[in-house]
Structure formats: C-alpha cells, structure tokens
Amino acid sequence: MREGAPNKADLVAAARAAAQRRPQRGVAVGEGPRGFDSHPDYRDSLRMKQVGALVGLSTPFFRLHEGHAQAVTRIAGREVTNFASYDYCGLNADPRVAAAAKAAIDLYGVSPSGSRLVAGCRPVHDALEAALARHYEAEAALCFVSGHSTNVSTIAQVMGEGDLILHDALCHNSILVGVKLSGAARRAFPHNDMATLEALLAENRGLYRNALIVTEGLFSMDGDMPPLAELVALKRRFGCWLMVDEAHALGCVGARGAGSFEAAGVPPGDVDIWMGTLSKTLAATGGYIAGSAALIELLRDHAAGFVYSVALAPALAAAATQALALLGAEPERVARLQANAALFLDAARAAGLQTGAAGPFGIVPVLVGDSLLAAKLSERLLARGVNVMPVMFPAVPMQGARLRFFLSALHDETQVRAAVAATAEELEGLRRDGFGSAIPPALLGM
C-alpha cells in the first residue's frame, strides 16, 4: 500500500467501535459521576487521534520550540523556518523590548500579586493604557490579563437582555462566547456581507434597546479585512455601537501598521470599541479596550475579566509599551512584513495554491479541504524544514481545513519562496497518492 493511502475497512471499523463506546445519556441515581474519559468532547478528540494513527499521522500541535520562535526556530534539535508565530513585526526578541521587561521586573517584581482593585496599579499599567489611547485617538484604554477574556468580559458587560448583537460569521471564538454570556439576542451575517447586515438591521433594530455590530480588523483564519467605512455608515444610520477586534490587524494593516482604521481611511473615533491583544505585534500577553472615558470606567468597575482577575504582569506591560513605541518609530518593519506577505501570495497563486481572499498583511491560508490532509501536509512540511500549523474543523467549516502561514518582517525572500515550493510539491504528492480521498467523510465530521 502506498504511504498515506489508509485501509478503508480499518477506518470504518474504528469509527463503528468509537460510536459503540459513546456514553448514553443519563445516569442512574447513586451510580456516581463518570470519569472525564466519558465526556463527549474527549471522545471526539480521541477518535480523531485514532483515525490519525491509522494513517500514520502524529498530532501536529504542541510542538516544542527550543528557543525564540522567530523566522527560524529550533524543533527536535534542528532549525526550521517558522510560519507559526504571531511575531509579525519581529519585536518579540528585540533587545529593547526585553530590556524594558527586565527593568520592570527589577522595579516591580515578577507578579502584580493581585487584581488592580486589590493590589493597586503600577506606573507601567498607566503608561501602556495612555499609549494605547493615543494610538486610537481615544479618551481612555484598559488592559486585561487575557486577550480572550477581553472580548468575553467586554461584550458580556456592555450588552444584556433586551439588546441585539450582530457579528460577522467568521468572528473569533472569544467574541461568540461573549455574545452568549451577555444574554443579548444574536444575529450572524455572512462574512463581510453588508447587504445582509443592512437587511438584518432594518428588520430587527427597532425591536431592541441597544445594538452592537462586531467585526475583526484582520480576520484570523482568512487574512482579509472588513469594509470598515461601510460598517461605520450602517452603525450611524441604525444607531448602533461598532466594535472592531484588532488582534491581528495591529502591526499588519495600514501603511504604518496602525490598524484597520489606517488602511480604510476611517477616523478611529468613528469606532466605539477598539479591542486588541498584546500577544502578537506587541510581544507580550493580554488584551485591551480603547474607547470613550465612560466605556472604560464601566469596564474598570464592572467587567468580570478585569475586576476579578490578577493585573497584567509589570514586565508584560512594559514590554508592550516599548513594542508599541517601536512600531510607530520603525515603519520599515511593517513594510517588510507586507512585502513578504505579498511575495508569498504571488508565489502561492502562481503555484496553484488556493489562498482565498487573503490580502498582503500577515496571515495567508492555504486551503486544502479535509482535516487529516491538512495535518499530514503540516507533518510533511516539518520534515522538509518548514513549521506551519493546520487549522481544522470545528475551528473552520467542514472541508475548509487549511494551513495558516503567519508571515513576519524577519522572513527573507529565500525562506518565503522555499516554503511555497515545498507546500505545493507536498500537497500535490499527497493528493496524487489519494491521501484524504479514501477516508470516510463521517470520520472527519467531528
């Protein structure tokens, strides 16, 4: 049997055996709790791993990096070109960012030792929030210890029962969780479909107290932007708030990497809630909100992810502040990033790879279809010295699996061209050998 061509009978038998092992609903009184190995999500994960093992596939996730994961990283004792880090502008290992973090540790310690309500604030927190407010020309900003929690806590606090949230169908999990926790009514509109959004607003806006439109400044799975000017026009026309998640946009989008407002030519004050993360271009960890003084005061006093969470570590706040300053002072980093992304896109499309609607910003998906094919392709590329992660169902739709390449200002032309060539060659080989086509679709629909 050719490598990568699984035995269909074995796969079907594995699926049937896994289905028979699924726990039934309900439990007899006095029986006691089941182990977590009976949890349906655990069973689904186990089943996917079993199918992978049948086709000789190890998990592509949780790879151990032995040092800085920059344009080149070290995995299992060998150097490989890295396309699996958010270090878009190459600031994560910049000595000036590291020096700022080390100085903050010397001055304030490693941990803030409590929430800011309990343990108080540090000057580095105030400095970072002031810098973020200036960046978005906002009255104020607030930092959270987690980017995911920033979206969850903000949406859940600002919106509630009797309100309406309209969000792009491709918005991040953190947005969807916040929407669910808020108790507000929810309407999803197809990706960047302004006609459908307008129709939803016309039909529903008058039925609710407050309305919030949520989108992303750079979509994390597809690498494209929203029509920000049209969103601003709709939010004004229908009396809504507009929230933009800039997690991936800062440093990637706009001539100086300022974000989606710069690229769209929209005054930042036209957006009511700017959200972003510190863990990508800003080389730290955490999240932030920028907006009106009233919004920030509301979150500062009531948002659960801020009030009941430890403060951002001083070293992270100092690192992010320094990285933001360097982003503004060294726009050539953004230019290199965008040039690398444009080169990758051009080379990929010339090689027949499907990159969807991605723009020359920092995220380029290579669409391959089924999930196991994406995982196998990632494995083959690592063997050829290219580290890139697959994205599979349910993070993306069925048959929407992809490799997601994160470009950096630190990559060079040789690395980019070599990665594209290897991807095209390995994908063609896997498809020629029938990898994926012999796998029953029921096994991939998990």
Image (cartoon, rainbow, N blue to C red):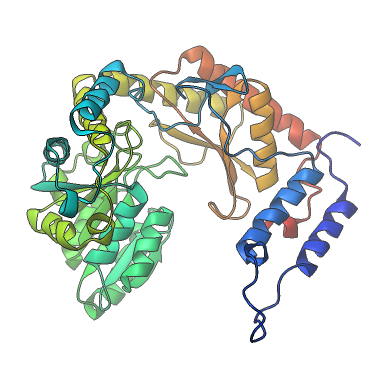
* Residue 18 percent across, percent down from the top left: 77, 62
Q: Nearer the viewer, residue 272 or 299?
A: 299
Report the quarter where the C terminus lies. Answer: bottom right
Q: Residue at 16%, 54% (x, y): give it.
A: 117
* Residue 234 percent across, percent down from the top left: 23, 60
- As drawn, 394 above or below 59: below
Residue 15 shows in the view: yes
Residue 271 shows in the view: no
Q: Residue at 25%, 45% (x, y): give it.
A: 113
Q: Residue at 33%, 39% (x, y): give it.
A: 285
Is residue 283 toward the left or the right of residue 307 in the image? Answer: right
* Residue 101 percent across, percent down from the top left: 26, 27
Is residue 21 toward the left or the right of residue 377 in the image? Answer: right
Q: Nearer the viewer, residue 351 or 429?
A: 429
Report the quarter where the N terminus lies. Answer: top right
- As drawn, 214 above or below 4: below
* Residue 225 percent across, percent down from the top left: 35, 43
Q: Residue at 70%, 37% (x, y): give it.
A: 376
